[in-house]
Image: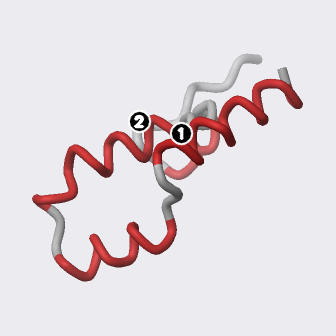
Amino acid sequence: MKTAPPPKYSHAWWLQQPPRPLVETVRLFEAKKDTLSPAVRRSLEQRLPPLEVAQQIDRDMKRLFG
């Protein structure tokens, strides 16, 4: 018996999604940076690597895990 897919944007749905490349996340942050609150902006600036580092991480992950 086939089970129904989870509702879109539910926790289970997000768990089934493939991981987003880090470069995509960094670019999205760069595009939206000016619209974010100062606290969120500071938090993401501390946690996200620069674009060049994110590209290197994505290349390494692709090479290691295919």
Q: Quadrant of the N terminus?
A: top right
Q: Which residue is mark 2?
A: 8
Q: Are marks 2 and 1 in contact (CB under 8 Å)?
A: yes
User: Considering only order in the chain, which callout, 1 or 2, is on the residue closer to the N terminus?
Assistant: 2
Name of the residue lying farthest toward the bottom: 39
Mark 2 → mark 1, Cα distance in angstroms:
6 Å
Report the amino acid beneath label 1.
Trp
Q: Seen in the image, is 54 located left or right of residue 30?
A: right
The residue sitting at 22% across, 44% down in the picture is 31
Q: Considering the numbered disc 1 on the image, is that residue within a helix, a strand or a loop? A: helix
The residue sitting at 66% across, 35% down in the picture is 58
**Which quarter of the figure has residue 38?**
bottom left
**Which quarter of the figure has residue 14?**
top right
Name of the residue lying farthest toward the left: 35
The residue sitting at 62% across, 44% down in the picture is 15
Vertically, is 6 above or below 36? above
Q: Seen in the image, is 49 located left or right of residue 24?
A: right
Report the amino acid beneath label 2.
Lys
The residue sitting at 47% across, 45% down in the picture is 51
Q: Considering the numbered disc 2 on the image, is that residue within a helix, a strand or a loop? A: loop
Residue 66 placement (x, y as % from top left)? 83, 20
Q: Nearer the viewer, residue 30 or 40?
A: 30
Vertically, is 52 above or below 29? above
Q: Which residue is mark 1?
A: 13
Residue 4 placement (x, y as % from top left)? 58, 25
**Which quarter of the figure has residue 28?**
top left
